[in-house]
């Protein structure tokens, strides 16, 4: 198969982004961050088709207010630098997706195959304890659950791994549902198996809600295959879950669901409840409009978070708010919180995301997920937003697209 020029330009970059972005680097540092000067040059070189740099002004407005109220200079400058490199990554990704849009399906297929190979390798080393941690996460996820390996490959944790793969997984699941794949069963397995192995409840739950909302809103516009696969898939999932709960006492899925419903799951409570509680207390004490500034949460909220969780030792040295919107509220106040929501809704309407079922489903997924986890400089989340607002896979368009091709009016 002959690939387009953009395929070869983008392949190495996407392999780094999806699989090795933080590999062998100190925690918090990414290759996409190191490549910021290159991405900035790329934005300058193709500035006529790049996003307007004026959007950076939104990040500059709070700076004087943060300095006036007082910040720790070192952490503020370092964290602000990370915010700006994340913005550069976001703008550069939009530009790359626009320029090489026609090559994205082939690139996604290659990444899907590489991911399947790595997943197979991970399953092979799963029984080998000395090397298991290379590709699996073996930290207990909830009270009463023994260590249960969760797939993370070369990323730092399962939720990040599953989040970064979601746009590609959703794309191929739609390809199958729209009958655009020659080997649908293999494609479905390549998408579903890694998600299940990651055991990332937040990601999986948000995906299910997003697909359900797409099904409800666009029931009459979707092909019959979509209805069947979603309904049959949902039925099979329910049967498997029911069978597991009835025959496997104390299985990790049932235990964690019970812990979440009872408020005993520290991870879920930390992401969904405590994050916003900490952010609210922080901005009310300091600056409710513009927040405390980047990097200041771990300083000003350190005692608050450590005392609440009763952290000790090494764990107490690093604390953060594990929720993108809550962290944004704490760092940039109501200004940042509302600005992000406004921009998401504004471009949802401006780009007519609602006319493309793939973009709509991915939008709903990320909109939900940002309230359940992630962080403000998470390139996995930013990459997803870039896909939504810069690409149009026309086979998933409700107006024209597959409907015209199929002769449906």
Image (tube, rainbow, N blue to C red):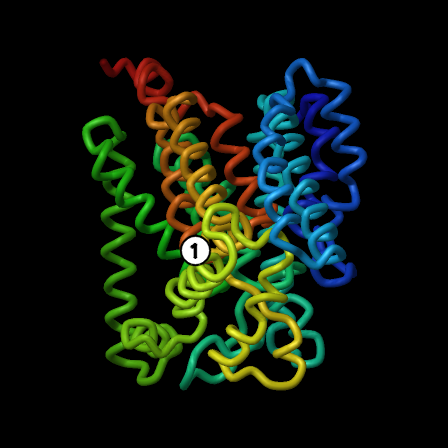
**Residue 120 visible in the current orientation:** no
Please determine whether, in this image, residue 128 is positioned above or below residue 13. Answer: below
The residue drawn where x is 68% and y is 47% is 80
Could you tell me residue 119's position as x and y percent?
59, 59
Residue holding disc 1: 203
The residue drawn where x is 67% and y is 60% is 154
The residue drawn where x is 70% and y is 41% is 85
**Residue 298 visible in the current orientation:** yes
The residue drawn where x is 45% and y is 32% is 343
Number of on-image labels: 1
Give whichever of 308, 362 is nearer the camera: 308
- From the image, which quarter does the C terminus lie in? top left
Give whichever of 66, 370 is nearer the camera: 66
Mark 1 residue element = helix
Left or right, residue 119 beside residue 388: right
Report the residue that reaches farthest toward the front: 68
- From the image, which quarter does the N terminus lie in? top right
Could you tell me residue 404's position as x and y percent?
32, 13
Left or right, residue 148 beside residue 66: left
Could you tell me residue 49's position as x and y percent?
64, 16
């Amino acid at each position: 198969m002959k690939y387009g020029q953009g395929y070869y330009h983008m392949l190495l970059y996407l392999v780094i982004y999806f699989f090795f972005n933080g590999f062998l680097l100190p925690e918090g540092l990414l290759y996409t961050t190191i490549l910021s000067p290159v991405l900035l040059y790329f934005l300058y070189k193709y500035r006529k088709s790049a996003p307007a740099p004026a959007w950076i002004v939104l990040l500059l407005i709070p700076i004087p207010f943060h300095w006036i109220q007082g910040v720790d200079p070192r952490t503020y400058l370092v964290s602000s630098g990370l915010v700006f490199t994340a913005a550069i990554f976001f703008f550069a990704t939009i530009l790359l997706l626009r320029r090489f849009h026609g090559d994205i399906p082939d690139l996604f297929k290659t990444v899907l195959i590489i991911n399947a190979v790595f997943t197979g390798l991970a399953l092979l080393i799963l029984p080998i304890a000395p090397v298991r941690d290379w590709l699996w996460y073996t930290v207990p996820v909830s009270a009463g659950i023994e260590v249960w390996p969760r797939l993370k490959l070369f990323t730092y944790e399962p939720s990040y791994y599953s989040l970064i793969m979601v746009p590609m997984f959703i794309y191929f699941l739609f390809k199958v549902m729209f009958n655009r794949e020659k080997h649908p069963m293999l494609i479905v397995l390549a998408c579903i198996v890694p998600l299940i192995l990651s055991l990332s409840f937040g990601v999986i739950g948000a995906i299910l809600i997003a697909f359900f909302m797409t099904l409800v809103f666009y029931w009459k516009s979707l092909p019959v295959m979509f209805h069947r696969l979603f309904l049959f898939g949902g039925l099979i999932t329910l049967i498997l879950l029911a069978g597991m709960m009835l025959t496997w006492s104390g299985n990790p899925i049932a235990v964690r669901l019970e812990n979440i419903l009872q408020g005993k799951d520290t991870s879920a409570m930390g992401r969904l409840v405590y994050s916003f509680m900490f952010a609210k207390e922080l901005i009310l004490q300091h600056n409710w409009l513009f927040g405390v500034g980047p990097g200041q949460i771990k300083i000003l909220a350190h005692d608050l978070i450590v005392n609440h969780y009763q952290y000790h030792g090494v764990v107490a040295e690093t604390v953060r708010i594990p929720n993108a919107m809550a962290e944004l509220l704490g760092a940039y106040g109501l200004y940042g919180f509302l600005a992000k929501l406004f921009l998401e809704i504004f471009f949802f309407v401006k780009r007519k995301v609602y006319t493309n079922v793939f973009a709509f489903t991915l939008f709903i997924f990320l909109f939900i997920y940002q309230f359940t986890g992630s962080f403000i400089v998470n390139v996995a989340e930013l990459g997803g937003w870039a896909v939504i607002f810069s690409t149009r896979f026309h086979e998933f368009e409700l107006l024209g697209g597959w409907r015209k091709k199929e002769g449906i009016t």
